[in-house]
Image: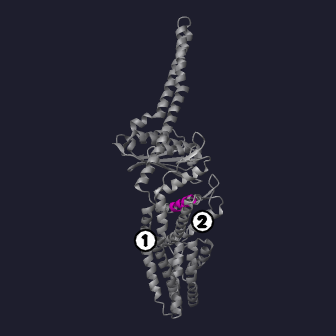
């Protein structure tokens, strides 16, 4: 029986090369049903290792992901992309689940190597009996058992090389866009301008995709304003006048697109990039696939006594070399992309000026709104009470001689109104700049604000000193706004606030609520972003539907003094 089982295991190994080729293509194209169907062979090998070889192997696969859930707006989000229907995001989610699972790549490696090792051990079982079965079981467990670092190392590099091959194929689309731009530029010379405008705008979307892959910012100049009519109702572009705004708008966009130096660098990059990607990205992929093909056909070559069997070791060496140098070549390609697609110094300066203009406008609007709020609170609160007190005192002055009892009651009311007005003024001052913030610093002010929250709030603060007063004020009111939003809208029971300083002020507000927070939803997050933008701060929102919600604020700043109060001590 042991010898028959050994022959069965050898027969199972014989189908490996064909399945490995199909599995690799299915993984690259994301055909999940084929990958799951081929997975039956490694699953059967694990089961036979336990039943026949007495070497049990646990299931190493990651759990199946749950189906995507809709956002509050009804869209489905998978890997930072939105879809209207759940079918395509569910398919992409399963494809990512398979490709990111290390056990999937172990299965592929087993299909490649097992035809040689598994066949040899299966035939050895015919000679040595049950001992050969145990050898075969241990070999299967070594490859299909618990995942080890080296399979992940291979998987990461294979994914990187295949992704580079995809970029190399996509570079041909850039070459086509560059050629079409040349043709449309010739048409623009005779007055047909809309093809050039459309192609340059689409080219910017194409190059921005590569910028996101490399991690560089957009270098383009801001769009021009919409042309405004002259006093006579006509629109002027240069020395020409037009009755309708159609042609002026088109010409303004054409001058903006063609006059931007970044458009010229995009064109040059699209022309040269195919040659660079074929050299740096397509070559490692070709070496990997060629070596894979040679290794998978090694058993067939030996069985047929083919004289070219020696290509198998050469193919294995080519695959290993591609895995080793693939990341280096990818970094070279990313650097090449950054040379032409990254913003220049002048472009960064122009974007910085634009950013400062926007934040200055936001600061002016915020300050004006704050002044209006203070004026309204004074007018509706303390000012009204002070006017009423003055009128009451004039009445007391008239009644003091003829009706002392009534005058005494009015004096008591005036005294009570004085206390109420004083409390209102204190609350107004607290809303402008809390005394605890000025006296004890940001951390203690956040602790005091946490005590007023109806939820269970935990504060962990580690500040080595005091910050500049404007930064402390902006951070304090931003935290208060986020805590108030969490208490009103999230349905949370606990909130945790972490405050740290490491070359920049980082504040994290985490709650266990229902999630779904969106800055565009009118929940106050947009106002917090504007408040932080005045100091070049950012607000990162991570709030999936179903929770939890994590809001991270980062403000670049410096310490104005070393530790001076208990506000720098952690809870």
Determine whether, in the image, residue 235 is placed left or right of residue 539: right
Q: Going by the picture, which residue comes out furthest to the left? A: 562
Residue 30's spot in the image, x, y percent? Answer: 58, 70
Task: Let me know if residue 514 appears in the view.
Answer: no
User: In this view of the protein, which residue sits in the foreground, 155 or 51?
Assistant: 155
User: Crowdedness of circle 1 by 10 Å Cα count: few (<14), some, many (20+)?
Assistant: many
Q: Which residue is mark 2?
A: 92
Nearer the camera: disc 2 or disc 1: 1
Q: Is residue 338 above or below residue 140?
A: above
Residue 264's spot in the image, x, y percent? Answer: 47, 60
Q: Quadrant of residue 37?
A: bottom right
Res 370 label? none
User: In this view of the protein, which residue sits in the foreground, 262 or 94?
Assistant: 262
- Look at the image and give the residue range highlighted in magenta: 197-208
Q: Secondary structure at mark 2?
A: helix
Q: Secondary structure at mark 1?
A: helix
- Of the numbered discs 2 and 1, the one sitting upstream in the chain is 2
Q: Which residue is mark 1?
A: 329
């Amino acid at each position: 029986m042991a010898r028959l089982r050994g022959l069965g295991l050898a027969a199972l190994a014989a189908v490996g090369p064909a399945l490995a080729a199909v599995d690799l293509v299915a993984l690259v194209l994301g055909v999940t049903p084929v990958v799951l169907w081929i997975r039956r062979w490694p699953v059967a090998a694990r089961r036979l290792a336990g039943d026949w070889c007495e070497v049990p192997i646990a299931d190493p696969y990651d759990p199946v992901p749950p189906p995507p859930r809709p956002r509050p707006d009804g869209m489905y989000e998978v890997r930072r992309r939105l879809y209207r229907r759940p079918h395509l995001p569910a398919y992409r989610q399963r494809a990512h689940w398979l490709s990111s699972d290390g056990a999937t790549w172990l299965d592929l490696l087993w299909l490649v190597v097992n035809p040689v090792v598994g066949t040899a051990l299966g035939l050895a079982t015919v000679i040595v009996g049950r001992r050969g079965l145990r050898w075969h079981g241990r070999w299967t467990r070594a490859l299909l058992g618990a995942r080890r670092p080296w399979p992940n190392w291979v998987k990461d590099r294979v994914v990187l090389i295949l992704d580079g091959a995809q970029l190399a194929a996509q570079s041909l689309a850039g070459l086509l866009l560059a050629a079409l731009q040349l043709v449309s530029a010739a048409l623009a010379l005779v007055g047909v301008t809309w093809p050039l405008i459309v192609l340059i705008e689409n080219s910017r979307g194409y190059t921005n995709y590569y910028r996101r892959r490399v991690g560089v910012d957009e270098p383009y100049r801001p769009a021009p304003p919409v042309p405004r009519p002259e006093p006579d109702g006509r629109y002027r572009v240069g020395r020409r006048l037009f009755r309708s705004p159609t042609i002026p708008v088109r010409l303004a966009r054409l001058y903006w697109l063609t006059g931007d130096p970044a458009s010229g660098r995009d064109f040059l990059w699209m022309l040269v990039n195919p040659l660079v990607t074929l050299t740096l990205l397509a070559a490692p992929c070709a070496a990997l696939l060629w070596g894979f093909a040679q290794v998978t056909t090694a058993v067939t070559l030996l069985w047929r006594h083919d004289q070219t069997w020696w290509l198998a070791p050469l193919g294995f060496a080519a695959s290993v070399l591609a895995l080793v140098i693939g990341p280096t070549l990818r970094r070279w390609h990313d650097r090449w992309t950054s040379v032409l697609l990254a913003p220049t110094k002048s472009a960064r300066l122009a974007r910085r000026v634009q950013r400062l203009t926007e934040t200055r406008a936001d600061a002016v609007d915020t300050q004006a709104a704050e002044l209006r709020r203070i004026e309204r609170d004074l007018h509706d609160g303390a000012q009204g009470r002070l006017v009423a007190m003055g009128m009451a005192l004039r009445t007391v002055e008239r009644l003091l001689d003829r009706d002392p009892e009534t005058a005494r009651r009015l004096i008591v009311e005036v005294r009570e109104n004085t206390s109420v007005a004083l409390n209102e003024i204190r609350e107004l001052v607290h809303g402008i700049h809390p005394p605890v913030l000025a006296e004890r610093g940001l951390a203690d002010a956040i602790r005091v604000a946490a005590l007023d929250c109806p939820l269970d709030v935990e504060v962990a603060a580690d500040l080595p000193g005091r910050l500049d007063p404007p930064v402390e004020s902006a951070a304090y009111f931003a935290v208060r706004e986020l805590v108030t939003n969490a208490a009103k809208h999230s349905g949370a029971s606990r909130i945790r606030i972490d405050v740290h300083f490491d070359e920049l002020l980082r504040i994290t507000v985490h709650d266990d609520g229902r999630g779904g927070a969106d800055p565009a939803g009118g929940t106050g997050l947009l106002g917090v972003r504007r408040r932080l933008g005045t100091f070049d701060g950012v607000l990162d929102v991570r709030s999936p539907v179903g929770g939890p919600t994590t809001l991270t604020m980062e403000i670049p700043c410096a310490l104005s003094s070393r530790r001076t109060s208990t506000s720098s001590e952690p809870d």
